[in-house]
């Protein structure tokens, strides 16, 4: 140990001064002062180094060699460019030059350094001037604090904080969506209550209008002129349309807890299809005859009737309406497909909202009611665009 330090001490040994050295210089004691200082440095836990004005290492303690994985004897008399990547060495040199130029302490809060094994460390370094016998800055002393563990902990904390922020953001979005859904349901509940009340009051006058139109038709008989006959037909059609709107309002307003039971799906479909005016639409049913479904028959029938009517309305010039089923491990899927023009993307995204409809003079409650009734069975309803065109509604119900 003393031999190694003696070699380093000789590199720093100043020429014999002509006058007594200044108290502030390194050489204020006997020639053994450097060796004595080296012995002290070697017992300091923090890495310490000394460079001369040529930026060569002339003194360093064992803590620095241990951190870098470079033997101390290898570093003596050489510069940063012999051991570190150029970008790092350039930064070290710039800070060394700053200290020699200003003759003042230079503090680097954070700097990277790569050791012999390629491992990167993060350092907090202080560089201070050391005066020679003539009072000029002769050496640079660097004191290092290895802040790598702190840096790693800080980065881990930042990553965890970012993750927590994402979680909070996601939870906030979920709460916001839940709140909006709650507000929407409350508003729809009020709309449903008002709709039910208004629907009953409007249906009575409609019945009177329909009866009056029927009496006119009976009175004029076959002798009626075309204009009169057409006017009576318009009255019947418009009364029927208004009555359908009222039925939709009542269906939406009177959703009750389901009373599930097992029954043939074919029977429910037949009831839902009864009364539908298919016109030029061909109906294809691909449902196994023995297939049972567990649901509230009235609610499922109403939901399917709304889907079938919606499909027929989407094909005013004719087409094909197909109802088929698929079974998964836990669900029965009922697929209602039409060959109409399809639904635009901007409408599909809002299809299950009230007052959203592709049909004129419609409140858009048919699909909303269908979804509400299906969800009331513990199922779900979604809209898809088949690759071959048209529209597909998928009713998914849990198996009994």
Image (cartoon, helix red, strand yellow):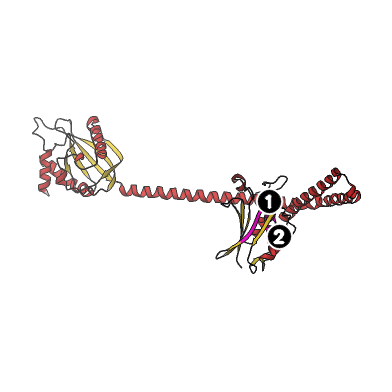
Q: Is residue 308 magenta?
A: yes
Q: Which mark is residue 318?
A: 1
Q: Element at badge 1? A: loop
Kindly report which numbered mark, 1 or 2, lies closer to the viewer in this rendering.
Answer: 1
**Quarter of the view holding residue 99:** top left
How far across and down, in percent of the image, does residue 188 sit?
Answer: 68, 51
Distance between the alpha carbons at the discs numbered 1 and 2: 20 Å
- Return the residue nearer the eye: 356 or 270: 270
How far across and down, in percent of the image, does residue 127 sit?
Answer: 24, 38
Quarter of the image that includes the C terminus: bottom right
- Which range is magenta? 298-324
From this view, report whether residue 246 is shown above or below residue 376: above
Q: Which mark is residue 97?
A: none
- Return the residue nearer the eye: 55 or 237: 237
**Quarter of the view holding residue 27:** top left
**Would residue 232 be visible to someone looking at this image?**
yes
Crowdedness near tag 1: few (<14), some (14–19) or many (≥20) residues, C-alpha within 10 Å = some
How far across and down, in percent of the image, does residue 381 sit?
Answer: 62, 56
Q: Earlier in the sequence, mark 1 or mark 2?
A: 2
How far across and down, in percent of the image, does residue 159 sit?
Answer: 41, 49
Residue found at the far right of this picture: 219
The residue at which mark 2 appears reads as: 272
Left or right of 103: which side holds 171? right
């Amino acid at each position: 140990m003393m031999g190694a330090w003696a070699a380093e001490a000789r590199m720093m040994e100043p020429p014999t001064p002509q006058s007594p050295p200044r108290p502030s210089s390194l050489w204020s004691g006997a020639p053994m002062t450097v060796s004595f200082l080296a012995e002290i440095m070697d017992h300091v836990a923090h890495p310490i180094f000394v460079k001369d004005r040529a930026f060569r290492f002339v003194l360093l303690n064992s803590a620095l060699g241990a951190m870098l994985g470079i033997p101390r004897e290898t570093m003596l008399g050489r510069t940063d460019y012999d051991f570190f990547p150029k970008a790092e060495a350039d930064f070290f040199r710039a800070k060394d030059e700053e200290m020699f130029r200003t003759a003042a302490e230079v503090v680097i809060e954070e700097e990277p350094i790569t050791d012999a094994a390629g491992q990167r460390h993060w350092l907090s370094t202080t560089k201070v001037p050391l005066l020679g016998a003539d009072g000029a800055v002769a050496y640079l002393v660097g004191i290092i604090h290895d802040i790598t563990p702190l840096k790693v902990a800080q980065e881990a904390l930042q990553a965890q904080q970012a993750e927590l922020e994402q979680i909070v953001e996601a939870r906030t979005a979920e709460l916001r969506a839940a709140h909006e859904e709650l507000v929407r349901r409350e508003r729809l509940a009020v709309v449903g209550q008002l709709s039910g009340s208004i629907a009953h009051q409007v249906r009575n006058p409609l019945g009177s209008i329909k009866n009056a139109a029927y009496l006119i038709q009976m009175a004029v008989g076959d002798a009626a002129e075309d204009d009169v006959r057409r006017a009576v037909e318009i009255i019947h059609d418009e009364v029927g349309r208004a009555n359908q709107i009222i039925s939709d309002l009542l269906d939406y307003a009177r959703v009750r807890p389901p009373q599930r039971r097992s029954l043939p799906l074919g029977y429910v479909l037949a009831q839902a299809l009864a009364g539908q005016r298919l016109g030029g639409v061909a109906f294809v049913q691909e449902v196994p005859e023995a297939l049972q479904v567990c649901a509230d028959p009235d609610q499922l029938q109403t939901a399917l009737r709304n889907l079938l009517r919606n499909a027929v309305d989407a094909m005013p010039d004719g087409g094909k309406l197909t109802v088929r089923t698929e079974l998964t491990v836990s669900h029965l899927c009922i697929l209602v497909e039409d060959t109409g023009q399809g639904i635009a993307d901007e409408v599909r995204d809002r299809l299950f909202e009230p007052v959203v409809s592709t049909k004129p003079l419609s409140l858009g409650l048919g699909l909303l009611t269908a979804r509400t009734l299906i969800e009331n069975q513990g199922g779900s309803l979604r809209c898809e665009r088949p690759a071959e065109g048209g529209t597909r509604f998928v009713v998914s119900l849990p198996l009994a």
